[in-house]
Amino acid sequence: MSIDWNAFTPGSAVVGGVLIGIAAGMFALLNGRIAGISGVVGGLLTPARGDVAWRAAFVLGLVGAPLVYTVLAVLPRLQIDADYGALVVAGLLVGVGTRYGSGCTSGHGVCGLSRLSPRSLVATAAFMGAGFVTVFVMRHLFGF
């Protein structure tokens, strides 16, 4: 294994992590809600009266912020080493996993761990473990 030192950007990663933590903390303090993406989006798919506006604003912010950023900064060229079929299957597996795990990495990994939730600790360990195993199998056993 080697590190691409030209793409290694710990400073921006730390700043991004701090901003995500502040946003999740403010969301919980000001709205009393967890900033888990699967729960926010799930609430849009089964809307409750008076509960749609903030969820729609949250999702629009998730989509809109990177679009605004592209106007302000030069982005690196995006390269995805997978075909559309693999991306669709991966997306569906993530969706099924968030359903079975009662949340996603943002809900459990960021918000749940910060609240010292034992369920989130187990879920995050399962997410990370599955990711490690998947990368090992795909790269070292199948050669992708």
Image (tube, rainbow, N blue to C red):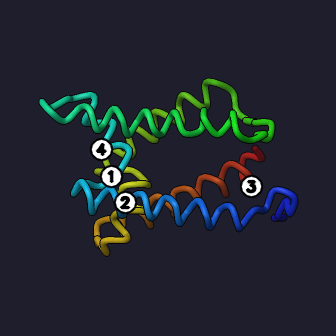
The label on residue 140 is: 3
Percent across and percent down for residue 77 are: 80, 36
The residue pinned by badge 1 equals: 101
The label on residue 39 is: 4
State the residue lying farthest toward the top. 84
Query: Compared with residue 114, is residue 137 higher up or lower down, i.e. above or below?
Result: above
Which of the two residues, 18 or 39, is positioned nearer the viewer here? 18
State the residue lying farthest toward the bottom. 116
Percent across and percent down for residue 131 are: 56, 56
Percent across and percent down for residue 59 are: 40, 36
Please name the amino acid that badge 1 sits on: Gly
The label on residue 108 is: 2
Please name the amino acid that badge 3 sits on: His
**Could you tell me which secondary element the residue under label 1 belongs to?**
loop
Q: Answer yes or no: do the residues labelled 1 and 4 have beta carbons within 8 Å?
A: no
Please name the amino acid that badge 2 sits on: His
